[in-house]
Amino acid sequence: MTADGLRLVGDVGGRPGAPTVILMHGGGQTRHAWAGTMGRLIDQGYRVVNLDARGHGDSDWSPSGDYGLQAMARDLRTVLATVGRPVALVGASMGGMTAFLAAGESDEPIADALVMVDIVLRPAKAGSERITSFMRANPEGFATIEEAADAVAAYYPERTRPKDISGLNKNLRLRENGRLYWHWDPRLLDSIQSAEPPNLPGILQVAHRVTLPILLVRGGKSDIVDEAGVKEMLELVPQTEIFDVPGAGHMVAGDKNDPFSAGVIAFLEKHLPVR
C-alpha cells in the first residue's frame, strides 16, 4: 500500500468481509509487536491489518524525515480509505496518538471504535524521557544480536530475558558496515524534541471532535500514563473507558498479552461485533 508516496508494509489476516481491526505499533517498534494480539483477533473472527508505520520496520523511510503525527495521520486516513468500514483502530503509544489525531482532524467519523494502548493526550514526563533516552542510545549500532538484547534488558530489567533472542532480528537491520541497527529511521528522533509532543496543541484543540467510543488500556506499572493524564483524558473525551492491565508496563501487549487481548476483544465486541 502507498501513502503520501511511501510504501507501507503490513500483514493482513482473517476472514475477508469481516469487521476490520487496524493495529498500529508504538514509536521505535514494528508490526511484529502485535503478533500475539493479531492471532487472537483473527481467532475471534476479525479481519486484521497490521502495519509498519512510515520509517519503521519494512515500510519506506520519509525522504524529508517527516515523522510528525500529522504525517502519520495522513497515512492512516489513506489506509482507512482502502479498508473501509466497519473498522476499529488499536494503537499503542505513537499509534494511539496518530489514530486520535486522525479522528479529530476528520469531518466525518473515520472508525467505529478506538483503543489507545498506554497513551494519553499528555504523557508523563519521566516515562517519556526514559523512552527517548533508550531510543537515542547506541547510535553506533550493535556488533551482535546479544549486544542488542543487553540494551533491551537494561531498559526493561523487570522483564524476564528470553533464552532465545532470535526474535530480535525482526527489529534490527544489518547495514553495509556489518553492524546491526534498530529497524527504524534515526531521523524519527528529530520529531521527539521534548517529553511534551510537538503536536500536543493540535491534539488538544481537536479533542472535543473525537466522538467515537474509546478504550484507554493502562499498564499497571506504566510510567507513561499517570493519574493527571487520565483525568485530563476523561475531561476532554468523556466517553473514554478505562481498562487496567495489572503487572504490565508501557509495552502492555508484550508484557501481559492474554489479559490485554481479552480486554480489547470485550470492548470490540460491544462496538464492532463479528456477525
Image: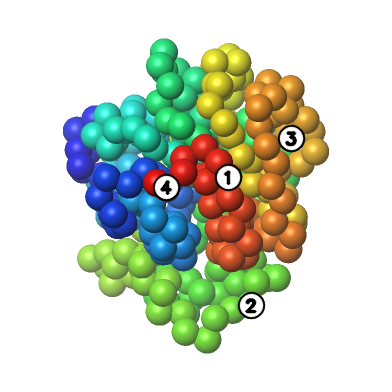
Q: Position of residue 31 (x, y in %)?
A: 38, 56
Left or right: residue 164 versus residue 9 is right
Kindly report which numbered mark, 1 or 4, lies closer to the viewer in this rendering.
Answer: 4
- At label 2, which amino acid type do we have? Thr
**Residue labelled with disc 3:** 230
Find out whether the residues at labels 3 and 2 contact each other: C-beta distance under 8 Å. Answer: no
Q: Which residue is mark 4?
A: 274
- The residue mark sitting in front, 1 or 3, is 1
Quote the CA–CA distance across marks 1 and 3: 18 Å
Label 2 neighbour load within 10 Å: few <14, some 14-19, many 20+: few
> Could you say which quadrant of the image residue 258 lies in?
bottom right
Which residue is pictured at 45% across the width and 49% down the height? 25
**Circle 4 — which element?**
loop
- Give, as a three-letter code, the residue at label 3: Val
Q: Label 1: which residue?
A: 267
Mark 1 is on which residue type? Phe
Whichever of labels 2 and 1 marks the residue nearer the N terminus, that label is 2
Up/down of 170 relative to 7, above or below: below
